[in-house]
Image (cartoon, rainbow, N blue to C red):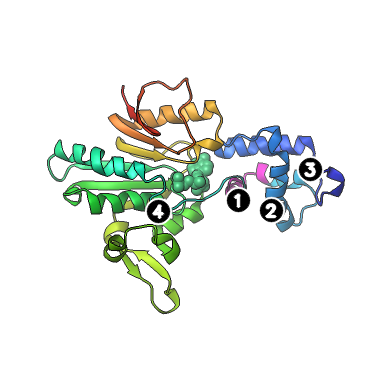
Amino acid sequence: MSSEVREFKFTTGDFQRLARIVRETSGIALTPAKRDLVYSRLAKRVRAFGFKSFSQYADLLDSGDQAELVELTNAMTTNVTSFLRESYHFDHLCDEILPGLIAGRSSGQRIRIWSAACSTGEEPYSIALSALARVPNVAQHDFRILATDLDSQVVERGRNGVYEASSVEALPKEWQRRYFQRGRGSSSGRFRVKPEVRDLIAFKTLNLMQPWPVKGPFDAIFCRNVMIYFDDETRARLVERFRQLLKIGGFLFIGHSESLPAQVQGFEFMKRTTYRRAV
Ligand SMILES: C[S@@+](CC[C@H](N)C(=O)[O-])C[C@H]1O[C@@H](n2cnc3c(N)ncnc32)[C@H](O)[C@@H]1O
């Protein structure tokens, strides 16, 4: 779009400033080709504040307004997710990984999984539901999932565990019956995850680009469909931090269109977007 027909002034300098802020806040890399996208995604934020230019909006962000920094990241990413998305990961987890862990541990022992960009919770609930429904004896262990995301609003939705019938339909009927409460009256058409499943998951706000107040080690980490927004260097740093928090032999699951940068070491490839900490 040419700048003459634009509602707000948006210079190359403004774009570069916003790209820097986005990168520093969330790790998301915006190449110059994304300039029009940045304009179209952020114009509504500029309008919402009654600003005349993107530089005023950048001033607000540079003043450290945390809530708006999250809005900025939300505008640049998507929270799209679904139950049992990329279902082969849950098959691998439940058919091979968890049974192997359980066979080697006496009951009551710790099993920890981290869903590191959990969005509205479908990913960590898919882990919990698959484990409960498919892995004998998992409930006899100290099995817990940490679910984190940068966006506090999606984290809150995950914590509530209320979903539209249309998204719960992706799950087997038997799981819907066993693990969800069907809404009535004004909640009709919605399903709420039962407390026995919700209690397995701790939802927290966490920015992957900042220090992580989390206690490892983890048996598995899911970091799916977020690294696609980062450049290779950021991705490599992130994966190295995951490596340090995984047990030796622990698993890293990444998104279907993602790969580990060439400079990453210490992982062996298992199968389809699944890696294992080797050292
Ligand atoms: C497309 S969703 C992926 C959800 C889920 N992992 C899946 O694969 O279905 C991407 C999520 O990454 C989150 N995100 C983006 N940048 C982040 C960061 N720096 N730290 C933590 N989460 C981030 C977004 O808020 C969004 O919820």
Q: Give whichever of discs 4 and 3 has the lower sequence position.
A: 3
| Residue occupied by mark 2 | 45
Q: Is residue 204 above or below residue 31?
A: below
How much space separates mark 1 and mark 4, taking CA atoms? 25 Å
| Residue occupied by mark 3 | 10
Q: In the shown orientation, is residue 78 left or right of residue 195?
A: right
Residue type highlighted by circle 1: Glu
CB atoms of marks 1 and 2 within 8 Å:
yes
Label at residue 83:
4
Identity of the residue drawn at 38% across and 67% down: 191
Kind of element beneath mark 2: helix
- The residue range painted magenta reads 61-74
Asked if residue 258 is among those painted magenta in the image, a careful observer would answer no
Identity of the residue drawn at 32% across and 34% down: 251
Rendered image quadrant of residue 166: bottom left
How much space separates mark 1 and mark 2, taking CA atoms? 8 Å
Q: Give whichever of discs 1 and 2 has the lower sequence position.
A: 2
Residue type highlighted by circle 3: Phe
The reply to whether residue 149 is in sight is: no
Residue type highlighted by circle 2: Arg
How much space separates mark 3 and mark 2, taking CA atoms? 13 Å
